[in-house]
Amino acid sequence: MHRTSENTEHYISIINWHFRSRSVSKINSDETNFIKLTNFFPDFS
């Protein structure tokens, strides 16, 4: 269906961007989104 490694690198770069740019008030929502992504892409763990 899709190439997992390319998607993984794509989402890792998005997550890294969020980690660099987020503020304290965003931490909880970012962590929730990260958990959702790790559930969707098991090879994150």
Image: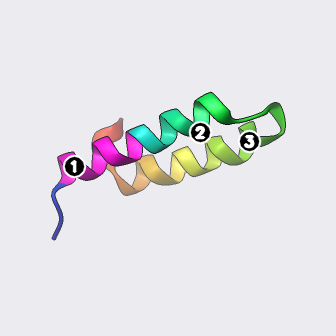
Q: Which residue is mark 1?
A: 6
Q: CA distance from mark 3 to mark 1?
A: 27 Å
Q: Secondary structure at mark 3?
A: helix
From the top left corner, tell me how far across and down residue 35 is, in percent: 53, 46
Look at the numbered discs 2 and 3 and tell me whether their residues touch, using CB distance below 8 Å.
no
Q: Horizontal placement of 32 versus 17: left or right?
A: right
Q: Which residues are magenta?
A: 4-12
Q: Which residue is found at the position 34% from the left and 47% from the top? A: 10
Residue at 81 percent of width and 31 percent of height: 24
Q: CA distance from mark 2 to mark 3?
A: 12 Å
Tag 2 residue: 18
- Is 43 magenta? The answer is no
Inspect the image, locate mark 2, and give the three-letter code of the amino acid beneath it.
His
At a point 29% along the width and 41% down the height, the residue shown is 9
| Label 3 sits on residue | 28
Q: Tell me the SS state at disc 1.
A: helix
Comparing 43 with 20, the one in front is 20
Cα separation, mark 1 vs mark 2, equals 19 Å
Q: Amino acid at mark 3?
A: Asn
